[in-house]
Amino acid sequence: MKRVLSGIQPSGQLTLGNYIGAMQNFVKLQETHQCFFMIVDLHAITLPQEPAALREQSEAVAALFLAAGIDPAQASVFMQSHVPEHAELGWIMTTASYMGELERMTQYKDKSAGKESIPAGLFVYPTLMAADILIYNADLVPVGDDQKQHLELTRDLAQRMNQRYDTELQVPDPYIPQTGARIMSLDDASKKMSKSNPNPASYIALLDEPDVIRKKISRATTDSGREVRYDPSEKPEISNLMAIYAHCANMQVSDVERAYEGQGYGAFKKDLAERVVEALEPLQARYHDIRQSGELHGILRKGAAEAREVASTTLRHIKDKMGFVLPQ
Ligand code: AMP
Ligand code: TRP
């Protein structure tokens, strides 16, 4: 069975962008692949986190994975920090990377822009992400469009290690949805929807109440004109809303376009709000059940044990090939 690995940072409230860009594919892939899905808490601390918030958000992301439909009997769900091999291979990958290639990462440039002092962890972030992926010899990595460049680097590092040390690391492929790989902000279609945006009206959080969702969608900016037509370059705002509609209603964007032919933005937005509410309500109900059930920690313990078995084997292989004296 081919392997899949992905991760989401517990650095804020998960949004509809995370759901459509990444989590919906997690749920699909678990049927046909051996899957590892983690809460990347070690990545979240590349920017300072308030300890109580980090703990709460980490548990919330784990519960949202399960609420979205990830089945712990099929996939391993775990905290990155529960598998210490990630950090160790992360260091090794840092030594295999060049300053120049890390300086080119656009996420680094965006996140460090305007900062007086830039945390070193933010700079080496992609080397830890490469370790996350390579330690499972993952074939596929379901992510949104913004992670493509990190995946390219991961592929380069895998090839570099294989050439230099004769390791047998799998060179992974990204798995990116055709529409919805980049859900944009509700207030500005030139920026991606992000949990770290200080304006909560710019995103829909997966745990937003129905009335909050209705209000945010009714206030979402729309392009001039009134035609509900999918055209991301000419009509970026309405096209973004149409992609959200399609994913929440399980339709193609072309069907959404046909359904709203001749109708204006108002009717479309009203229905869109209901589609989003309908998609999130069952997820939210399951989320609250999971948080109350007290089962979360047992599931994470099992997931980490499954993950460690694979991770420790790969790490041992790499260290052996590199010339480390292995403990006998
Ligand atoms: P992050 O929140 O940065 O940890 O991202 C977790 C996953 O969600 C990654 O695969 C991202 O590419 C994806 N993602 C985040 N924001 C969006 C968005 N606005 N549209 C599509 N995918 C997204
Ligand atoms: N860098 C990813 C993001 O910001 C999160 C991440 C960390 C990840 N490790 C990963 C994604 C491994 C896929 C695979 O979204």
Image (tube, rainbow, N blue to C red):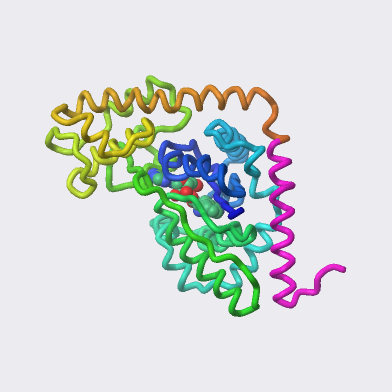
Left or right of 240 on screen, residue 78:
right
Q: Residue 214 at x, y = what percent?
A: 33, 23
Question: Does residue 249 lie above or below 305 as drawn?
Answer: above
Residue at 61% of width from left, 53% of height from top?
A: 1
Question: Does residue 8 lie above or below 155 as drawn?
Answer: above
Q: Residue 138 at x, y = what percent?
A: 58, 58
Left or right of 281 on screen, residue 6:
right
Residue at 22% of width from left, 35% of height from top?
A: 257
**Residue range of the region highlighted in magenta in the rendering:** 299-328
Q: Is residue 313 magenta?
A: yes
Q: Residue furthest top?
A: 211
Q: Residue 250 at x, y = what percent?
A: 38, 33
Report if residue 295 is visible in the image: yes
Q: Magenta region, mostly helix, strand or loop?
A: helix
Left or right of 219 on screen, residue 300:
right
Quarter of the picture holding the C terminus: bottom right
Question: Does residue 299 lie above or below 150 as drawn?
Answer: above
Report if residue 52 is visible in the image: no
Q: Is residue 46 magenta?
A: no
Residue at 57% of width from left, 52% of height from top?
A: 5
Quadrant of residue 56 in the image? top right
Left or right of 224 on screen, residue 292:
right
Residue at 60% of width from left, 74% of height from top?
A: 161
Q: Residue furthest right?
A: 328
In-front residue for pair 131/314: 314
Q: Residue 13 at x, y = what percent?
A: 49, 36
In-front residue for pair 31/141: 31
Q: Residue furthest bottom?
A: 164
